[in-house]
Image (cartoon, rainbow, N blue to C red):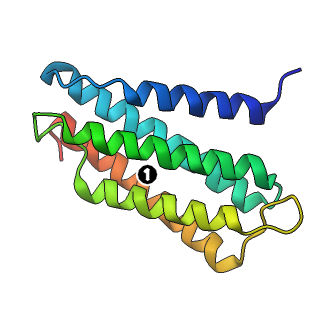
Amino acid sequence: MYSPTLAFRLCLILLAMLLSVVSVAENTGQQLSLDKLEELNKVSAKLVQEARSSKAKATPFRIDARLYRESLRTLMLNNQKINNVKVRIPRTSLINMVRMSALLSSAAECRTGRYIVCPAELMTKLKAQQQLLSKDLDSFKAMLNGTG
C-alpha cells in the first residue's frame, strides 16, 4: 500500500545519501550545489506545510526534521570542499537554512497527543523563514546564471 509519508521519508533518505557523495570538480560543482539547495528547499517547504496543517503525526515529523538537519550538515561540509568560491552556496543562505532547521526542531517538539500543533507565532516564523529560503534559492540561481 502506498503511503505519502513513507514515500517522503524514503526521498529524504535518498537525499541524505546523495548529499554524502561529493564532487569538487569545477564543472559539476555548480549544478550539484544548486540541486542540493533546491532539494533541501523542497524538503523544508514540505515540513513547513505539514507543521502548519496541524495534522502531521509527531513521530514521523520528528524523524523528517532530523533527516533535514543531517542533510543540511552534509551539504554544509560538502560546500566547504568546493574549490570554486563562485559555485559555493553563500554563507547567508546556509545560515538561513540552519535557522530553518532550528525552527523545524522547535516545531517537532510542539505536540498535542500524536500530532504536531504549534503556537501561531512559531507558524508565522516557519512561513517567513521558508519564504526567505525560497528567495535565497532564487538569488543563488541568478548568481550562477550571471544575472545576479
Point out residue 78 in the picture as x, y percentages from the top left corner. Answer: 28, 36
As drawn, 118 above or below 71: below
* 36 and 10: which is toward the camera: 10
* 88 and 23: which is toward the camera: 23
Point out residue 126 in the picture as x, y percentages from the top left corner. Answer: 57, 65
Could you classify mark 1 by the number of other residues whose Cα lies within 10 Å: few (under 14), some (14-19), or many (20 or more)? some
Number of marks: 1
| Left or right: residue 118 compared with residue 23 | right
Point out residue 100 in the picture as x, y percentages from the top left corner. Answer: 48, 60
* Amino acid, disc 1: Ser
Q: Quadrant location of the N terminus?
A: top right
| Left or right: residue 138 compared with residue 13 | left
Mark 1 falls on what kind of element? helix
Point out residue 119 in the picture as x, y percentages from the top left corner. Answer: 71, 77
Q: Residue at left 58%, top 30%?
A: 13
Q: Residue at left 31%, top 45%?
A: 76
* Quarter holding residue 80: top left
Q: Circle 1 sits on which residue?
A: 134
Q: Residue at left 33%, top 60%?
A: 95
Q: Residue at left 28%, top 49%?
A: 139
* 113 and 97: which is toward the camera: 113
* 141 and 118: which is toward the camera: 118
